[in-house]
């Protein structure tokens, strides 16, 4: 079984909540054809027809003794009636665990049988616990839903759901772009330097003008990385935007009575996005934006195409790296991070060398480590020095190949570390 840490679970929980909300909004949208086609798809799956006036609700507790207060991801109700016509459970990542209540003969299965409520699971195509889903339940693949959305939905739902599928579903080797990011130090270094330069200036400007703000760390929300704050009744975000069609460094304003989409703005999921240099076309925070535009012009800050591509790769890359600690029970192939989870070794991502093996300083001779970067309590042994071995490991396509390349890489790096031991 895969060892799942709190950060992994938190990331998946956020994505599941977000995808659930997006799906329910699309299912309840009577202006597009997506709703009708999905109701038809549900009906075919369970060999029944679902009422056209059905409404979908997020995270509802059903008053059934078997569920004991558990919340369903989505339930479908006919207005005025208490018995659901459909119960839906969602999983986003291919390794996300099924709880005991969600398995065969669990609370969900028993409730479905006893009360005659169809039970549906929406899962990634490569979901690892598919065999534990109740036999009588229906199953839909996220890609099936995406196909219907692309063909019949008239909102940006398909683009949004595709972004989540890209990040969470793929259980594949690293792409060439991802390998380049991990093995060419200058790429990661440029991203961090540009990002830090601008965000530090944004923070200073917000402080200067007395704005109360909070830093929005990387999340799967529509924003990317930057600062959230409220001004004059508007919820604002200034920072780097991860949406593929939106302005890259942008002001983001939550839709309200004070914002008017005049065709110049990118709109997604309840927010307007506008480039910083053009942000005077909406009611934002002109004091802050004026100072920020002056800074960008004075410092001649340029968001390079390389930076932009690097920044967009990061969510998927971090997701893949978080999965490297998976242990495949079929032949006990243990990935890199799991092996390095003890106190002496640590995998370091995003440092001076992009990605490195950290060896605890207490077991190394400081005088022999003057050419290595110090990170907290560790010295970094950069994998970019062993680019060929590292690339071979990342691009391994079979378990056997992965194990072989893993052994070669670690053996080489640890031999180098042994030369510097006390």
Image: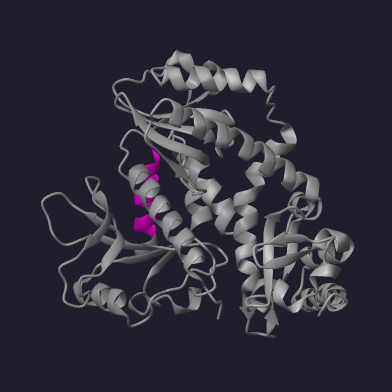
Height in image: 23 above or below 211?
A: below
- Looking at the image, residue 313 lies above or below residue 10: above
Secondary structure mainly formed by the magenta segment = helix
In x, y percent, where is residue 347? 68, 67
Residue displayed at 38% across by 53% down = 20
> Which scheme is used to colour this image of the protein?
one colour
- Of 24 and 357, nearer the camera is 357
Relative side of 129 to 346, left or right: left
Q: Is residue 228 above or below residue 112?
A: above
Question: Image check: 310 left or right of 278?
Answer: right
Residue 386 painted magenta: no
Q: Residue at the far front: name it.
A: 367
Instruction: Write the residue at 79% across / 63% down.
Output: 395
- Residue 246 in sight in this render: no
Q: Can residue 310 be seen in this view?
A: yes
Q: Position of residue 180 (x, y in %)?
A: 79, 51
Q: Say which residue appears at 70% left-offset and 81% top-offset.
A: 333
Q: In which quarter of the image is the C terminus?
A: bottom right
Magenta stretch in the rendered image: 33-44
Q: Position of residue 219 (x, y in %)?
A: 49, 49
How many numbered marks are there? 0
In the picture, measured across the screen, residue 40 lies left or right of residue 345, that is left
Pinpoint residue 341: horizontal percent, then vertical percent. 63, 76
The N terminus - image quarter: bottom right
Frontmost residue, 326 versus 62: 326
Residue reaching furthest left? 80
Q: What's the residue at 12%, 55% (across, down)? A: 81
**Looking at the rendering, which quadrant does residue 169 occupy?**
bottom right
């Amino acid at each position: 079984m895969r060892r799942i840490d709190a950060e992994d679970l938190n990331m998946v929980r956020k994505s599941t909540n977000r995808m659930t909300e997006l799906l329910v909004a699309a299912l309840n949208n009577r202006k597009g054809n997506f709703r009708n086609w999905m109701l038809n798809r549900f009906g075919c799956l369970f060999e029944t027809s679902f009422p056209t006036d059905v409404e979908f609700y997020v995270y509802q507790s059903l008053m059934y003794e078997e569920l004991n207060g558990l919340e369903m991801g989505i339930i479908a109700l006919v207005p005025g009636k208490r018995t659901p016509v459909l119960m839906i459970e969602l999983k986003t990542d291919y390794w996300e665990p099924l709880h005991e209540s969600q398995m065969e003969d669990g609370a969900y299965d028993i409730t479905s049988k006893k009360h005659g409520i169809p039970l549906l699971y929406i899962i990634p195509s490569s979901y690892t616990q598919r065999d534990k889903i109740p036999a009588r339940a229906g199953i839909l693949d996220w890609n099936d839903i995406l196909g219907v959305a692309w063909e019949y939905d008239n909102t940006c739902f398909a683009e949004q759901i595709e972004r989540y599928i890209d990040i969470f579903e793929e259980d594949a080797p690293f792409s060439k772009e991802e390998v380049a990011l991990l093995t060419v130090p200058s790429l990661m270094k440029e991203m961090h330097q540009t990002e830090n330069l601008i965000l530090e200036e944004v923070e200073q400007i917000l402080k200067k003008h007395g704005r109360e703000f909070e830093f929005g760390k990387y999340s799967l929300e529509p924003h990317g990385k930057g600062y959230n704050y409220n001004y004059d009744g508007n919820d604002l975000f200034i920072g780097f935007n991860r949406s593929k069609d939106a302005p890259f460094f942008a002001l983001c304003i939550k839709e309200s009575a004070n914002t008017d989409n005049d065709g110049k703005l990118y709109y997604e999921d309840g927010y307007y996005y506008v480039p910083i240099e053009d942000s005077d076309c909406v009611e934002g925070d002109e004091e802050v934006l004026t100072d920020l535009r002056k800074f960008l012009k004075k410092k001649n800050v340029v968001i390079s195409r390389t930076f932009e591509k690097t920044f967009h790769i990061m969510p998927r890359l971090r997701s893949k790296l978080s999965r490297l600690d998976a242990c495949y029970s079929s032949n006990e192939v243990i990935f890199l991070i799991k092996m390095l989870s003890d106190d002496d070794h640590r995998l370091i991502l995003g440092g001076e060398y992009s990605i490195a093996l950290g060896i605890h300083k207490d077991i190394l001779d400081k005088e022999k480590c003057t050419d290595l970067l110090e990170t907290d309590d560790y010295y970094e042994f950069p994998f970019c020095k062993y680019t060929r071995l590292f690339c071979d490991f990342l691009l391994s396509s079979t378990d056997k190949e992965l194990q072989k390349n893993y052994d070669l890489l670690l053996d080489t790096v640890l031999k180098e570390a042994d030369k510097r031991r006390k």
